[in-house]
Image (spheres, rainbow, N blue to C red):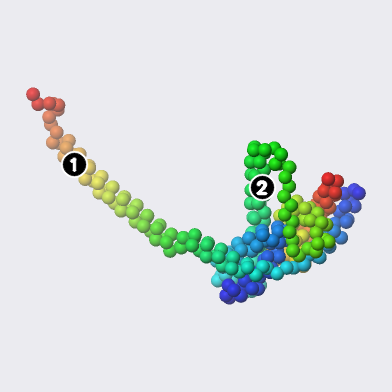
Amino acid sequence: MSFLKVYNEHKDLIYNLALQYTQNTADAEEITQDVFVKVHQKIHTFGERSELKTWIYRITINQSLDFLRSKKRAKRSFFFEAVRLDDSLSNVTVSDYNHPGVLLEDKEGMAAIFRGINKLSAKQKTAIILLKIEQKTQAETAVIMNTSVKAIESLYQRAKNNLGIILKMNEGK
Amino acid sequence: MNDKESIKLVPSTLNILSKIKPVEAPASLYVNVIQKIEEVNTKTVPMLWIKAMAATVLLLLVADAAVISMNDNIDAESTTIGLIEIENYQLYYE
């Protein structure tokens, strides 16, 4: 399988999945590049197309989560640095919600939901993204997340419950 | 609204997520991907080089150990000879 073929078949999948995690085009582009570097390194080890697709899903999810973790760490260290230099900087909030797949009229509501989703655990967030945005079945989600359908069911239930509580708390703010 | 009511509203809230439309990856992405792959390839040391370096270091260590053990034998011999030869304990001749 040539790299160009793999690129053309999966570029939108990777870019969109990264967008669901970051809600930001620049970040999604960076993640997509990193995923393709890994794909390029391991492309010869994959025989079946379905095997490759599942692996690409997994690697994109892991890359997106790693990216968000490192971004969070960088923000935190910036925060401490800012506090040390000037206390007023600690009130700065960065609004970088930039999802091209969301219509302008839905943007505000969608940003509020994503604020809640972003507070969920990595597994719960992944379950919601795969089931509700990527429209995967529970069986497909289970394969991608390397778990059972039952585990996905309970994970999704917990995610819904937690999201309800988070959204209610955010409402009060 | 209590917690239970807000949890009941979540499924309808989550259905809004299906409104998100898939977008096309930017056209410039391929060039950037190839650039990044080349960058990574130039930064990464090939496996053959790593193996060659490891073999060289190992060879040097073995050679070093051999030389040291040979020197030890020579030192031991010369020390014995030296001990036999030195019979004069006076520091200076008067």
Q: In which quarter of the image is the C terminus of chain A?
A: top right
Residue B3 is left or right of residue B73, and the answer is right
Question: Most extreme residue toward the left, as rendered?
Answer: B94
Q: In which quarter of the image is residue B89?
A: top left
Q: In which quarter of the image is the N terminus of chain A?
A: bottom right
* In the rendered image, the vertical position of residue A22 relative to residue B25, given as above or below: above
Q: Position of residue A74 (x, y in %)?
A: 64, 48
Assess disc 2: are there few (<14), some (14-19) or many (≥20) residues with their C-alpha within 10 Å of its C-alpha: few
Q: Residue B78 carries which label?
A: 1
For image coordinates 76% across by 65% down, the residue present is: A101
Inspect this view and state whether residue A65 appears. Answer: yes
Front-most of residues A87 and B19: A87
Assess disc 1: are there few (<14), some (14-19) or many (≥20) residues with their C-alpha within 10 Å of its C-alpha: few
**Both marks 2 and 1 on one chain:** no
* In the rendered image, the vertical position of residue A79 relative to residue B31, given as above or below: above
Label 2 vs label 1, nearer the camera: 2
Q: Position of residue B17 (x, y in %)?
A: 80, 62
Residue type marked 2: Lys
For image coordinates 14% across by 33% down, the residue present is: B86
Subunit under mark 2: A
Q: Position of residue B88 (x, y in %)?
A: 12, 29
Residue A41 is left or right of residue B74, and the answer is right
For image coordinates 59% across by 68% down, the residue present is: B31
| Callout 2–callout 1 Cβ contact below 8 Å | no
According to the image, label 2 marks what residue? A75
Subunit under mark 1: B
CA gap between label 2 and label 1 equals: 68 Å
Q: Quadrant of residue A92?
A: top right
Residue type marked 1: Ser
For image coordinates 85% across by 49% down, the residue present is: A171
